[in-house]
Amino acid sequence: MSRRGNCHDNAVAESFFQLLKRERVKRKIYVTREQARSDIFDYIEMFYNSRRKHGEANNMPPLAYEKLEEFKQRSV
């Protein structure tokens, strides 16, 4: 959690939740909590982590970036 004078601790989480709301949640109406959970899980696992490009990861999806970093570590 952020504390006084250290406002950047939550920046990544706040950015993620802002994107989640803008790209997924505000565009749909969920009838049940289970439907919402399932849809948000699909968004995170099927799109956000595997296909959506991230600036902090050299414009690569997080899974591809992690594989690249793992490959670099093995080759050293």
Image (cartoon, rainbow, N blue to C red):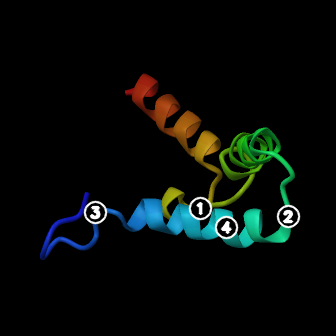
Nearer the viewer's eye, disc 1 or disc 3? Answer: 3
Residue 42 in the image, given as x and y percentages of width and height: 78, 42
Secondary structure, mark 3, is loop
Residue 54 is labelled as 1
- Amino acid type at image mark 2: Lys
N-terminal label among 1 and 2 = 2
The 10 Å Cα crowd at callout 3, few under 14, some 14 to 19, many 20 or more, is: few
Among numbered discs 3 and 2, the one appearing first in the sequence: 3
Q: Residue at x 65, y 51 (%)?
A: 61
* Image location of residue 75, percent across then percent down: 45, 26
**Circle 1 residues within 10 Å: few <14, some 14–19, many ≥20:** some
| Disc nearer the start of the sequence (4/2) | 4
Residue drawn at 70 percent across, 73 percent down: 22
Q: Is residue 4 left or right of residue 28?
A: left
Mark nearest the camera among 3 and 4 is 4
Q: Residue at x 67, y 67 (%)?
A: 21
* Measured Cα–Cα span from mark 3 to mark 4: 20 Å
Q: Secondary structure at mark 2?
A: loop
Task: Find disc 2 in the rendering and name its residue.
Answer: 28
Q: Which residue is mark 3?
A: 9
Q: From the image, which quarter does the C terminus lie in?
A: top left
Mark in the foreground, 3 or 2: 2
> Could you say where residue 65 lies in the image, as x and y percent from the top left?
56, 45
Q: Residue flagged by tag 4: what amino acid is it?
A: Lys
Left/right placement of residue 65 relative to residue 28 reads left
